[in-house]
Image: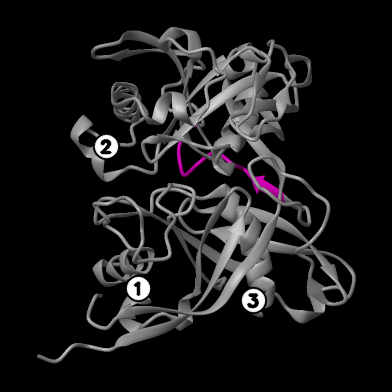
Amino acid sequence: MKFAPQVKIPATYMRGGTSKGVFFRLQDLPEVAQVQGEARDNLLLRVIGSPDPYGKHTDGMGGATSSTSKTVILSPSDKVDHDVNYLFGQVSIDKPFVDWSGNCGNLTAAVGAFAINSGFVESSRVPQNGICTVRIWQANIGKTIVAHVPITNGEVQETGDFELDGVTFPAAEVEIEFMDPADGEGAMFPTGNLIDDLEVPGIGVLKATMINAGIPTIFVNAEDIGYTGTELQGAINGDSKALAMFETIRAHGAVRMGLISSIEEAVARQHTPKVAFVSKPKEYVASSGKKVIAADIDLLVRALSMGKLHHAMMGTAAVAIGTAAAIPGTLVNLAAGGGERNSVCFGHPSGTLRVGAQAREVDGQWTATKAIMSRSARILMEGWVRVPAGCF
């Protein structure tokens, strides 16, 4: 019996914010995978090592968590005043499925550096020393993101003293601007309400803020579902009943937001929407052992991604948090003390994060002009990934 050899594909393994993923240039993919479809999905599944019934990703580049089972495809932008097109694929761990329905805000921090290193940014716009502005077209949601990447001696600066809770070592700060961050088309509040009564079987009626900003997100109050808002991963991810409850909330919220037409469709849309719970500030000890003081934060937020409590906070969900906090009357805003604000510092399982947002009401409709946060990014490995020929 003859066995097909492995195929090697140029790739870069990068950390961006509190996530990491495998980055590709579109032109380097096998021709059949350069277009959207089954071949591309199968290739990325094999690269990551999914589906893995053992939940370990031993035979792939994935890390067996939603934060580390990610893929990015970049290409020169075909949009005016943009440098690069950024396409994000969230790879399921235990199912043969790649979700293309949303963005990854954390990996956005690495997109700018990859674009510069790949020659997608004109050399005349890359300073010898200073900040290079990279104009990114986020192809999943059709939005503009601007990354401000530090440059030293003509090269992307990756090391520095910027510390990000959820990331072990300091690095160079990358400021990210999410322009007009309402996700996709339609209203930022798809139900037309800042707070809805969301009926969830087995739970009852929950107060919920459902917003399209950064990524579609469903916010509920921690106390309404039996939590304090200080929980770490172990308190939820080992509780099958809790995870099932959150998935039920997510599915029913997705229907109310118009993202899916039936509950059954939620299983094929794992990446979006996110579900999160909020509460007023309380003191707690983060997963790193760091004590978070109530007086140092505006509110607490815990969010789930791909069915599990996130170890820190998704970048896109942070955009949703900042935007919702800027709008008086949302659950996020009320948890932060109410009133008008243009930035918020929130506590998450790994520590704290500050995000700024600008929102305004026009003719009874809320719109967001931008959300801003700082992240960091670093190349972990570059070269080739190998997959068996014929797997795609």
**Dot 3 amino acid type:** Phe
Q: Position of residue 115 (x, y in %)?
A: 64, 71
Q: Is residue 183 magenta?
A: yes
Whichever of callouts 3 and 1 sits on the residue coming sooner in the sequence is 1
> Residue 19 versus residue 74: which sits nearer the camera?
19
Assign a secondary structure to mark 3.
loop
Give the CA distance from mark 2 to mark 3.
36 Å
Quarter of the image with the C terminus in it:
bottom left
Determine the residue positioned at 40% across, 35% down.
308
> Residue 121 versus residue 291: which sits nearer the camera?
291
Give the CA distance from mark 3 to mark 1.
19 Å
Assign a secondary structure to mark 1.
loop
Q: Any mark on residue 120, and which?
A: 3
Give the CA distance from mark 2 to mark 1.
25 Å
Assign a secondary structure to mark 2.
helix
Which residue was labeled with disc 2?
Answer: 266
Q: Is residue 304 magenta?
A: no
Whichever of callouts 2 and 1 sits on the residue coming sooner in the sequence is 1
Image depth: mark 2 or mark 3 in front: 2
Q: Any mark on residue 260, and which?
A: none
Specify start and end residues of the magenta stretch as a single range: 176-187
Q: Is residue 110 left or right of residue 202?
A: right
Q: Position of residue 269 (x, y in %)?
A: 31, 43
Which residue was labeled with disc 1?
Answer: 35
